[in-house]
Amino acid sequence: MAYVNFAGVPLCNYTDNFEIQYVYSLYWASTTMISIGYGDITPKNPIEVGFTIVIQFLSCLLFGYSINQIWSIIQELNLKTSKIHFKLNLINLYMRDKDIGGELTSKVNAYLNNYYYSKNLRERDI
């Protein structure tokens, strides 16, 4: 009998039907392409191989979704910060155009920075 061996474990017999050979080939391809690795515990029959393939793809999708959600949170925080900086720049531009003194400008900037910082903290507590 001719067997396909991987890491010393016989995966399938060449005389098995085409569907079983295809499942084992799909297992090899998915495990290699997803870069999960073969590990010490490998599936021993076609049902375990099919289950492993499904779990690998679901895990890959879950990982991608998690990374996407984390990135969305980071972008949302950056968007809020960008809006605050834009508003502060507009106010500073207005004060410069109206020739408002440096001391009043610093007090206004300190107040607005404190206001936006404390508002941001209040929103996080909610």
Image: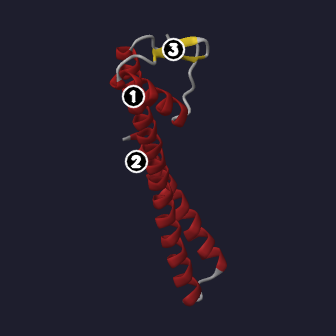
User: Which one is earlier in the sequence, the residue at label 2 or at label 1?
Assistant: 1
Question: With respect to residue 66, does 8 lie above or below?
Answer: above
Quick one: quadrant of the C terminus? top left
Which label was assigned to residue 22?
1
Dot 3, crowdedness within 10 Å: few (<14), some or many (≥20)? few
User: Which one is earlier in the sequence, the residue at label 1 or at label 3?
Assistant: 3
Q: Is residue 16 visible?
A: yes
Real-space Cα separation, disc 2 to disc 1, in angstroms: 54 Å
Query: Where is residue 86 drawn, in percent x and y?
Result: 50, 71
Query: Where is residue 28 drawn, in percent x and y?
Result: 50, 28
Helix, strand, or loop for circle 3?
A: loop
Real-space Cα separation, disc 2 to disc 3, in angstroms: 66 Å
> Looking at the picture, which amino acid does disc 1 mark?
Tyr
> Looking at the picture, which amino acid does disc 2 mark?
Glu
Circle 3 sits on which residue? Answer: 2
Circle 2 sits on which residue? Answer: 123
Dot 2, crowdedness within 10 Å: few (<14), some or many (≥20)? few
